[in-house]
Image (cartoon, rainbow, N blue to C red):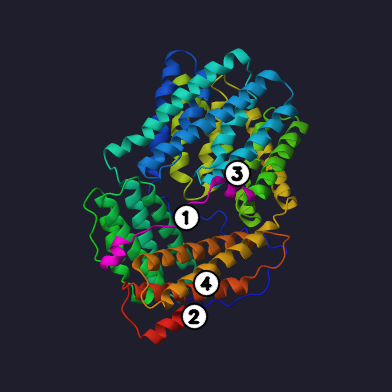
Amino acid sequence: MSSASPTPSTPLARHLPLAGVLRLGRPSEIWFKPALSVVAAIAPPAFTLLALGRLDLVMYAMAGSLCALYAHSRPYAARARALVWVVLGMLGGVGVALVAASLTGSAVVLVTVGALLAAAQKVLCDATRVGPPGNVVLTFVSSASLFAPQTLAQVPGHLALAAATGAWAWLVCMAPALVRPHGPERRATAAALKAAAGYADTGGTGEGHARARAAGYAAVQAAWQSLLSTGAPSRTRRALERLVVRAEVALAAPTQAEAGRLRAWAGSLRGTGPVPETALPHAAADELLGVAAARPLWSKLGPLTPLAARTALGCALAGYASLALGIGRPYWALVTAASLYQANITLTWSRAVQRVVGNVVGVLVFLAVVPLAHLGPAALVLCCLAFSFGAEVLISRNYWLGSVCVTPMALLITEFAGYQEAGTLMTERVVDTVVGALVGFVAAVAVTNRRAGDRVERALAAADRAREHTARVLAEPDPGPSALESARRGLAVALSDLRVTADAAAGEWWQRALPQERVVLAEQSGHRTLAATARRQGLLPYRDPATETEDARP
């Protein structure tokens, strides 16, 4: 139960935070997977082109190789499908960019094409939740291709090279399945157990309990999505499902959860050892239904319309501003703007600060490594590999830290076609970064997202309907186990969606006051109903029926 004090209104504009924006967090548990994969995907094509004396083609080879950054948290069956779409999306963006570059030399037209591509990539990546790194890598590749000298006759060959390296990246990302075929879903289940243990530590009322609860339900939902995308059920999957149910139960009744046991189960999922078998009531064990079915893609695109408008406008204006200043690579400003746009204005501001700081420091790092990189073509390739590895090692701790490696790597890529004057490159990069960040953020403020409040209202209505449905099921004298499990899972998903929607809307500007008090009350009554449902299923110690009915009441 939440004890937060409801607030009846939301200010139209908020203070832009600086404290904590650059604070380092814990590294991702699988930081080494994308880091090693991208090196393995880039190195063979790059050294092959080096041996052939065609380093000028490395940019097209890297377009496919960078697809190795995606889908590392997904089970291998789902990863295989996701990576195919990532490679196809990359080829589509590069194909449009190369054709545009071959048909016109107008920088204004090319910037416009790049901005439209960036908006499409942003919306599709957000709607399908492909990421990290989301749309930024795809936009970087397609935008750079727009300003590469090109003829129509060269386009098929360059696309074929990108497709070949994309296929190699697919093989690199799928290779770990031979060693640990259930690794991703084991990690997702372990994350859900640890998040539930963190909430149990608060007792449901301690400091930070609301944030811990939201994180717990998000982790549980991610675990269900992971398990349900693995294909046909297996013994391992069934055992993992039971553990996820245990995490759900701990979230419903944190005072009765054993945090130590949850963490022990999570620890046992490391490696390839057997999955712990947990005892559940027979009915619950047979009715593991998972999360609600995924919504169709088209239904997810509508709410992203303001984000698409921000991206298109911000990228276009950033590119035009760079051209007006006489910068030779306006796509740097365009990509900077594209990288800013997050779920709301507050997060977009934080990303803008991180981007500027990381790029400025990265330019200084480039200055330090230029003498080494210019020792020869092999040294240039090795430096790019080192920075690609370093970027993935650091970026999960904070975006700006990863940018410290991404920036020199991007500058070095421009030198595959020939060495350039370092001072000019550095100046252009800093100016484009500042221009892209400023113009991009102004565009985000200008394009208001008044639909955020409407989405909160819809999420509230959905949570209320789910709670009322669950309460009706509980009131039946003999509800079936399937009905109880389906109602409980549906309510959990609705409450998780409500919290995500409310958090995103709270960071937006220029909108009507949000119904924060109603959100808090809906969460309180919803979580009481979840606890009552878990007891009715036999997943929690029995309590007096009168108390149970009271828990389910709004």
N-terminal of the two: label 3 or label 2? 3
Question: Residue 281: x, y in percent?
Answer: 27, 68
Amino acid found under the numbered disc labelled 1? Gly
Q: Which residues are magenta?
A: 281-302
N-terminal of the two: label 4 or label 1? 1
* Pointer 4 with pointer 3, Cβ within 8 A: no
SS state under label 3 = helix
N-terminal of the two: label 4 or label 3? 3
Image vertical order of residue 136 relative to residue 61, above or below: below
Query: Left or right: where does residue 529 sit relative to residue 286?
Result: right
Report the residue that reaches farthest toward the front: 477
Amino acid found under the numbered disc labelled 2? Arg
* Pointer 4 with pointer 2, Cβ within 8 A: no
Residue placed under numbered mark 2 in the picture: 553
Residue placed under numbered mark 1 in the picture: 25
Query: Left or right: where does residue 457 sit relative to residue 374?
Result: right
Residue placed under numbered mark 4 in the picture: 523
Numbered mark located on residue 123 in the image: 3
Distance of mark 4 from mark 3, alpha carbons? 29 Å
Mark 4 packing: few (<14 Cα in 10 Å), some, or many (20+)?
A: many
Amino acid found under the numbered disc labelled 4? Glu
Question: Residue 138: x, y in percent?
Answer: 55, 35
Q: Which of 55/160 is in front?
A: 160
SS state under label 2 = loop
Q: Which of 382/97 is in front?
A: 97
